[in-house]
Amino acid sequence: MGYQNITFEKDSVFLVTGGAGFIGSNLCEALVNMGYAVRCLDNLSTGKYENIEALAERENFTFIKGDIRDMDTCTEAVQGVSYVLNQAAWGSVPRSIEMPQLYEEINIRGTLNMMEASRQNGVKKFVYASSSSVYGDSTTLPKKEGQEGRVLSPYALTKRVDEEYGMLYKKLYGLDTYGLRYFNVFGRRQDPDGMYAAVIPKFIKQLLHGETPTINGDGRQSRDFTYIDNVIEANLKACKASGDAAGQAFNIGAGGRLYLIDIYHHLCRALGTDVEPIFGPPRKGDIRDSNADIGKARELLGYDPEYDFAKGIALAIDWYKEYLK
């Protein structure tokens, strides 16, 4: 299980776009520690240099400040690269509703630029971040590839389009692409600040600081919360996957389903506090229930998540206690 025993050719070069972000920086760190050459491309619009600062001194790590919306930047970044892990995107459903044109530019055009640059420069595998949001208004549980509903936000639409491009680039050009539909990833270095922060780091920080968190909706919405190390495993195993599995999208979750109010009470117990939350209005564009069927990823990628929620949240809480001192 896990990713520690995954190996690549010694001269492999990895490009992680969005590499200064939450998921990207964890991918960079894992690959650098495994001894591979890693390039990190990020414009620092949402990523933070502090996430990769410790890697900057490592001789097998290179930081490129640049924007995937610029084709020349993409082309230069992929020179000599074996594997691209494309994490560069703007997240947040609510923010996408406010800024649909920007999401189109970054999440669709930027991803297309990276696919095209990868195709032109002989990249072996192109692994890219998709999202469980592509399931839209589908009420089927668990969520299974091929049973998508109508998307509910511009963010979800951008990820749906990325998947269509991924399929076309395999079919038309032979580029091995793998879309990873992340289900509510959490863990070290996920930003707890800002109005678009994810709920787990936001709740942890508020509870540690004696503040009263707000839950949007009634708290009975459910999620498949997925620890960051599971996502690292999925990316690296996609890089090793058969070309027969390329051009497709895969659910990457823990395969569980937890209610938000139960998560909140779990955090309260773990942090030794007892604060009743405030309940606010539901957020536009949010999926009500989410639970991943990971059977396809198990079969075609060899994905075998090592961390369930309990194991992952304990590690995350320990990290935030140290980080938020």
Image (cartoon, rainbow, N blue to C red):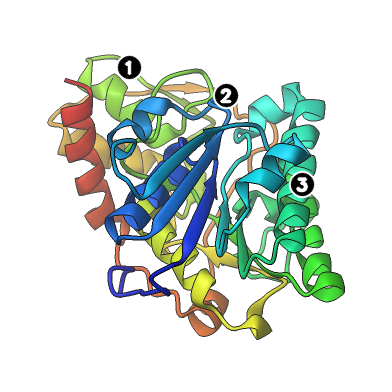
- CB under 8 Å between discs 2 and 3: no
Q: Find disc 3 in the rendering and name its residue.
A: 113
**Which callout, 1 or 3, points at the residue further toward the start of the chain?**
3
Dot 2: element: loop
Q: Is residue 147 visible?
A: yes
**Which callout, 1 or 2, points at the residue further toward the start of the chain?**
2
Image coords of residue 125 (percent x, y): 61, 68
- CB under 8 Å between discs 1 and 2: no
Q: Is residue 186 above or below residue 30?
A: above
Dot 1: element: loop
Q: CA distance from mark 2 to mark 3?
A: 18 Å
Q: Residues within 10 Å of mark 2 (few under 14, many from 20)?
A: few
**Which callout, 2 or 3, points at the residue further toward the start of the chain?**
2
Foreground: 324 or 27?
Answer: 27
Q: Residues within 10 Å of mark 3 (few under 14, many from 20)?
A: many
Q: Is residue 275 visible?
A: no
Q: Find disc 1 in the rendering and name its residue.
A: 212
Image coords of residue 62 (percent x, y): 44, 42
Q: Is residue 286 above or below residue 245?
A: above
Horizontally, residue 272 falls left or right of residue 165, namely left
- State the residue at coordinates (62%, 70%): 124
User: In the image, which disc is placed on residue 187?
Assistant: none
Q: CA distance from mark 1 to mark 2?
A: 29 Å
User: In the image, which disc is placed on residue 45?
Assistant: 2
Q: Quadrant of residue 34?
A: bottom left
Q: Quadrant of the C terminus?
A: top left
Dot 3: element: helix
Image coords of residue 241 (percent x, y): 54, 79
Horizontally, residue 320 falls left or right of residue 65, namely left
Tag 2: amino acid: Ser
Q: Is residue 65 above or below residue 158?
A: above
Foreground: 60 or 209?
Answer: 60
